[in-house]
Image (cartoon, rainbow, N blue to C red):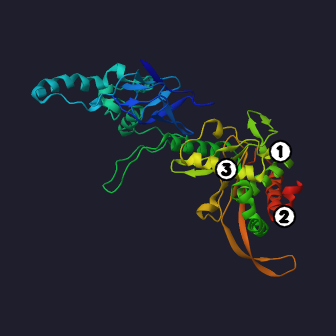
Amino acid sequence: MAKIVVPTLGESVSEATVARWLKQEGEAVKADEPLVELETDKVTLEVNAPESGVVSKIIVGEGESVAVGALLGELKAGAVANDSGKKAEAPKAESAPAKAAEAPKVAASVDEPKLSPAVRKMLADNNIDASQVPASGKDGRLTKEDVQNYLSSKPVSAPAVSSAPSAPAPARAVGPREEKVKMSKLRQVIAKRLKEAQNTAAMLTTFNEVDMGPVMELRKEYKDVFEKKHGVKLGFMSFFVKAAIQALKEFPAVNAEISGDEIIYKNYYDIGVAVSTPQGLIVPVLRDADHMSMAGIEAKIGELGAKARDGKLSMDEMQGGTFTITNGGVFGSLLSTPILNAPQSAILGMHKIQERPMVMKDGSIQARPMMYLALSYDHRIIDGREAVSTLVRIKEAIEDPQRLLLDV
């Protein structure tokens, strides 16, 4: 009997949620075939079959939280699939006894052995009888979300007047033209991290605008030969990654982070590039981007972006960034104030390119393809001069791309 367990999830990640079982009890599987999808606060990953056989038992149902190393189910190695599997029905002639046999199963849905450690603790902490809570998990199992929903629906006495911040409003009843959908683990953590960034950092945003004409002309002239030689299209992001790295080298505090009462300066440049996926915003990281060519940056961004949208990113590809770039312009955003990707101290926001009348150096007025840039930063570690200067350096490099080649 082979065990199906939760694998190591990555640095600082100790818990996951069972998103869905890809195989059911009684189904045959081949070695390394995906069995179940787990959702963490960063990515969705698959747990594969350790060997060929038949899924004999599913222990943890969909929607339940599990820790690293927890037992998800069991696999009977070398067994032949049972065509009836889970859906096997009792013979019609024995319909009455079958109903009697099912009774213990219903009663067992609230038995103590069926409860995960996390659910037991929540019940004990809140002095709740498991039989009082409606269960929505697989085979009538009780999940953490069931207990949370039960607690939210219980009437509470009016709290004493306090100066402390008010708690979030409890879940309300759904109207006839409304639909309630449980937040995914990823969405819950995104919400938590963004709010923590607002509450922790002294966050400010400085703005500038950049004339994209020179980069657009350069791309137009070399895009065909670039794609033919490197097998990848020349986009805008590689220019901004290179420009940002130049600025970070000049102003190292923008590439640093606060740890307690100390500052950690990073002598490497792992640049996060925000990617929008159906599950939420994900930030894969370009490792040692300062050692990558323009073609290398474009190829890696394309690879990571595709993996992010398919939910195939590894934990290593999501961790350790030193600075983040996000492009709201792809959705038509003209201007925004991006939120820090903690524990990083700064994030660059790109926006939509739009032609605007600009006064040129010779006094003439021309329609130029302009983009607003935004740099949000943690004022606890980065002074206004450093933030503004960083954004100016990025602007100068984009408006004069030769600077990127000469490193000036």
Q: Nearer the viewer, mark 1 or mark 3?
A: 3
Q: Quadrant of the N terminus?
A: top left
Q: Which mark is residue 130?
A: none
Q: Is 69 placed above or below 373 here? A: above
Nearest to the observer: residue 82 or residue 380: 82
Query: Percent x, y for residue 260?
Result: 73, 33
Query: Percent x, y for residue 244?
Result: 78, 52
Helix, strand, or loop for circle 2? loop
Query: Percent x, y for residue 204?
Result: 71, 53
What is the count of numbered marks? Answer: 3
Badge 3: few (under 14), some or many (20 or more) residues near its Cα, within 10 Å?
A: many
* Residue at mark 3 to residue at mark 2: CA–CA distance: 23 Å
Q: Which mark is residue 400?
A: 2
Q: Which residue is mark 3?
A: 301
- Indicate left or right for 153 with 257 as reference: left
Helix, strand, or loop for circle 3? helix
- Disc 3 residue type? Ile
- Disc 2 residue type? Asp
Q: Which residue is mark 1?
A: 252
* Residue at mark 1 to residue at mark 2: CA–CA distance: 22 Å
Badge 1: few (under 14), some or many (20 or more) residues near its Cα, within 10 Å?
A: some
Q: Residue at x 37, y 34 (%)?
A: 146
- Indicate left or right for 268 with 68 as reference: right
Q: Residue at x 38, y 38 (%)?
A: 149
| Callout 3 touching callout 2 (CB < 8 Å) | no
* Residue 75 visible here: yes
